[in-house]
Image (spheres, coloured by chain):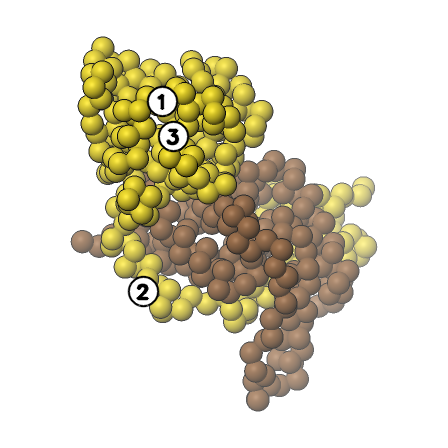
Chain colours: A brown, B yellow
Amino acid sequence: MQDSFVEDVVALLPNLKRFALSLCRRPDVADDLVQITAERAFRARHQFDPATRLEAWLFRILRNAWIDMLRRDRTRGETVDIHDSPQADPVDSAAQTDDRLMLQSVHAAITTLPEDQRAVLHLVCVEGLSYAETAQTLDIPRGTVMSRLSRARRALGEQVGIKGGMGR
Amino acid sequence: MDIDDDTLMALADGEIDGDEAARLHAQIAADPALADRYALFTQSADWVKAASLANPEATVSPDLEARIREMAATTSPEAENVVPLHRPTSRWQPVAMAASLALAIGLSAGLFLAPGAPETGATILSADVQERLGTLPSGAEDRLPDGRRISVVASFTDSAGAFCREYETTAQGGDSHVGVACRNGDDWSLRFAIASVSGNDGYAPASSLEALDAFYAAIGASQPLSADAELEHLK
């Protein structure tokens, strides 16, 4: 029997991995979080309200799994290095290099933001959740979503030099 | 007329649409300074998204996907192996604050609440109940010598790692209690109990269990343990 719930969850695994990375910044921990999230989702599938977005429900589970993990002190206090990027593409054009450097500097800047700002930035800008969905996912008021989002972007703008009129 | 940053950001994030959005866009188009401020929000969103999508670490390995598919095939949903206590909302989520815990207890026929007071609780659980807590797997039911039935709902660990169990006792007249006890050495101490006002269908109303959920959040309860993990503690 084709289980569409399972297929829907599997289809969202890359989104879960990205969100997990934005929270914990470590690929091995992110994989653990994705797996825990999927397991909890399969167990609690009857609690999912099909009238709501599956990804928002899954992000919420993942976020709670991350909090649980922190609470157990499994990762707290560990410093996280900004990882090396994979080896350079030997046929980079100058434009590609510029883009890649830009993305790397954005990535590096994001990792320096406080976790609560990373979470809202990710859910809104990458996953396209509304402010209301983000507020619900993170259990914070909508106004808090906006203030964190705005602070995060201002910090990014300063670090990376995103300014109006820059193009793209 | 100036537009504040919150409005510019909400516009960039698609939170504003229709006539108001059109009016704002027109105003931004006519004002270079405003356009610069607006660009901070649209461009930061674009870059954040691009950076996340381009992150080589953000891939799901075939191995991880395979593990998850296998898990999907072997994981049974909670509802199938616990006694019928209806919990429509997500449990074990640290949503509830301590303040709402106190409120919920006040509202919900609370009998006893003693987080962090094991010595008080230890005297309340009879040896018969304690014995069942140490042996019955979740989902199993037994009859106590005094005629009450006892069933264990789930096992979990608290934030300090103590093995805890949620259980329910039902007297012959139908009065039932839901309790949470945690193991402390050889003894079990009662941490939480409510009279569960069961309806005729045997389902406790959700409201009486909100206090329980708040309690779980307050003690940092883990997700329910799997049958295998539980067995380790019951040995």
Amino acid carrying label 1: it is Leu
Asked which secondary structure carries label 1, the reply is loop
Tell me if I can see residue B157 in this picture.
yes
Q: Do tags 2 and 1 sit on the same chain? A: yes
Q: Mark 3 lies on which chain?
A: B
Q: Which chain carries label 1?
A: B
Q: Closer to the observer: label 3 or label 2?
A: 3
Q: Which residue is drawn at 49% across and 60% down?
A: A29
Tell me if I can see residue B24 in this picture.
no
Asked which secondary structure carries label 3, the reply is strand
Which badge, 3 or 1, comes first in the chain's sequence? 1
Q: Quadrant of residue B149?
A: top left
Which residue does the numbered mark 1 point to in the structure image? B125
Q: Cα distance, mark 3 to mark 1?
A: 7 Å
Which badge, 3 or 2, comes first in the chain's sequence? 2
Q: Which residue is drawn at 59% across and 38% down?
A: A140
Amino acid carrying label 2: it is Ala
Q: Cα distance, mark 3 to mark 2?
A: 40 Å
Is A155 or B76 nearer to us in this picture?
B76
Amino acid carrying label 3: it is Trp
Please provide percent x and percent y for residue A136: 52, 39
Q: Quadrant of the C terminus of chain A?
A: bottom right
Which residue does the numbered mark 3 point to in the structure image? B188
Q: Mark 2 lies on which chain?
A: B
Task: Please count the marks in the image.
Answer: 3
Please provide percent x and percent y for residue B57: 51, 69
Q: Closer to the observer: label 2 or label 1?
A: 1
Q: In which quarter of the image is residue A93?
A: bottom right
